[in-house]
Image (cartoon, rainbow, N blue to C red):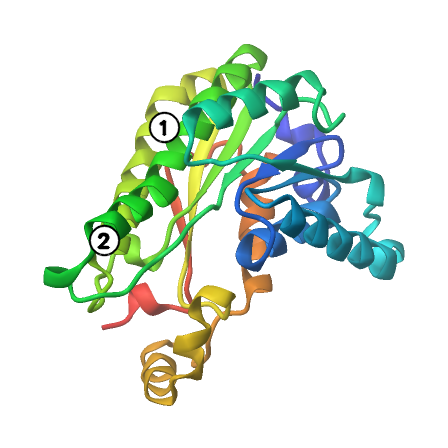
Amino acid sequence: MTINLNQLPSIQLFNLTGRTALITGSTSGIGFELAKGLLGAGASVILNGRSSERLNKAYDALAQYVSDNALNSGAKKELIHTCAFDVTSWEDAEKAIEKIELGVTTNSGPIDILINNAGMTFRSELQDFPVEQWNNIMRTNVDSAFYVSRVVAKHMIKRGKGKIINTCSVMSELGRPATAPYTASKGALKMLTKAMAVDWGKYGIQVNGIGPGYFKTELTQALVNDENFSNWLISRTPAKRWGNVEDLVGAAVFLSSAASEFVNGHILYVDGGVTASL
């Protein structure tokens, strides 16, 4: 379905009111911040993770955010939902998504926006890298995006529209010591994003990626605390700082909205200029 952009005021291009977003791996970190951002733009959000306990805590935190900011953002607690399932299991993903689409699990309606954000890393010299950790990284960072997207896309194809966003990384382009499997997984996710765009673009679906640089999250806290690494990173980054998770919200809202109707197969790097600098 083609949207006539001439009929929309510019600000309305970014309005997500009436749309439902499923965000995998959203109990904390980047995923949780993206949920806040899309909620603030009017979307109904479905938080996802494997742990019901962590999901409940994330729900409470997001509900508190709404309570504290509703007058400014227009967000509503009723727009927050949770769905616990393991994205690394295609059976779990398929069952959960079918229930979401039918409104059985969340009463939130069909999935208009999918953000494949679940991810993990493990650091080790490549020659000593544990095989099981390689498999865990690939299952979490690549397989999950395929498992979830293939089911969601079938429903989007029927409706003739949809937005899929994959959380890639600057490591989709660059290598760093002791991160080879993570780099390989994010490189694969970049190319999977492009391939999804090629296959599904004709159905009115836009598939793009967000490529975060180095951001302060639970996964990077050890690096943040490493003074030598932090100094090196800041000197290497044109913006001269670490990224904050809220820096990703604008990119996510853009790629989720009508403003990006003709953007497909693109990786939007939000990295303070790292990928532009030698």
User: Reading the chain from its start, which is encountered first: label 1 or label 2?
Assistant: 2
Determine the residue positioned at 21% across, 66% down. 178
Left or right: 200, with 96 as reference point: left
Q: Position of residue 201 (x, y in %)?
A: 42, 23
Where residue 98 appears, as percent x and y from the top left, is 58, 18
- Tag 1: amino acid: Met
Q: Which residue is mark 2?
A: 181
Secondary structure of the residue carrying numbered label 1: helix
- Decide which of 42, 44 is in the foreground and name it: 44
Determine if residue 72 is in view.
Answer: no
Say above or below: 242 vs 53. Answer: below
Q: 146 or 72, which is in the foreground?
A: 146
Q: Is residue 221 left or right of residue 71?
A: left
- At 30% from the left and 64% from the top, the residue drawn is 275
Residue at the right extreme of this rendering: 71
Give SS at disc 2.
helix
Q: Quadrant of residue 80?
A: top right
Whether pointer 1 and pointer 2 mark residues with C-beta atoms closer than 8 Å, the reply is no
| Quarter of the image with the N terminus in it | top right
User: Would residue 132 be found to the left or right of residue 141 on screen?
Assistant: left
In this rendering, the answer to whether 185 lies above or below 28 is: above
Q: Which mark is residue 196?
A: 1
Q: Which mark is residue 52?
A: none
Position of the C terminus, as image quadrant, is: bottom left
Q: Is residue 118 visible?
A: yes
Q: Residue furthest left?
A: 127
> Residue 62, percent across and down?
74, 53
Frontmost of labels 1 and 2 is 2
Amino acid on which the number 2 mark rests in the picture? Pro
Which residue appears at 72% of the width and 46% of the height?
Answer: 39
